[in-house]
Amino acid sequence: MTDSSPPQAAVLSPATSISAPIERAVTAFVPQEGRTVKPPVNPALLRHRELDEGEFWRKIPAYRDIDTATFLDYRWQGKNSITSIDKLLLAIAGLAPPEFIADASEG
């Protein structure tokens, strides 16, 4: 006679270490009474957390000549933040397709 009962699911609790390796993430879980617990996320779906390395801003025409120290300075960032459509269009001139520029200009 074989046991056909499903395997025991792990219970996520505050004691669960958030530094535990992803490989040990539980795939089946039972929420604690009165709490909703989301299932662990597939690490392959976390690509948005892989930030660009290097001087990625140099691809943007308006920032092409900005050195690393200047670009990473919070004061420079505050003064040069794009806060309007006009500033956006100036920053990406020559980078975005003309159709995008025309559409953004129209609002």
Image (cartoon, rainbow, N blue to C red):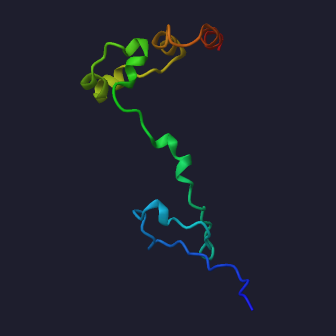
Q: Would you place residue 95 above or below residue 48 in this image?
A: above
Q: Give the residue drawn at x 27%, y 22%.
A: 70
Residue extending farthest front: 1
Nearest the viewer among 49 and 102 is 49
Nearest the viewer among 107 and 92 is 92
Q: Residue 95: where, in percent of width, then height?
A: 50, 12
Nearest the viewer among 81 and 1 is 1
Q: Would you place residue 10 above or below residue 74 in this image?
A: below
Q: Residue 90: where, in percent of width, then height?
A: 47, 9
Is 27 situated left or right of 18 in this image?
A: right
Q: Give the residue drawn at x 24%, y 25%.
A: 69
Q: Give the residue drawn at x 49%, y 13%.
A: 92
Residue extending farthest bottom: 1
Q: How many marks?
A: 0
Nearest the viewer among 23 and 98 is 23
Quadrant of the rendered image containing residue 19: bottom left
Residue extending farthest left: 69
Q: Would you place residue 50 above or below residue 43 in this image?
A: above
Is 25 situated left or right of 68 in this image?
A: right
Q: Give the residue drawn at x 42%, y 18%.
A: 59
Is 52 situated left or right of 30 in this image?
A: left
Q: Residue 102: where, in percent of width, then height?
A: 63, 8
Name the quadrant of the N terminus: bottom right
Name the quadrant of the C terminus: top right
Q: Residue 16: where, in percent of width, then height?
A: 45, 71
Q: Would you place residue 92 above or below residue 23 in this image?
A: above
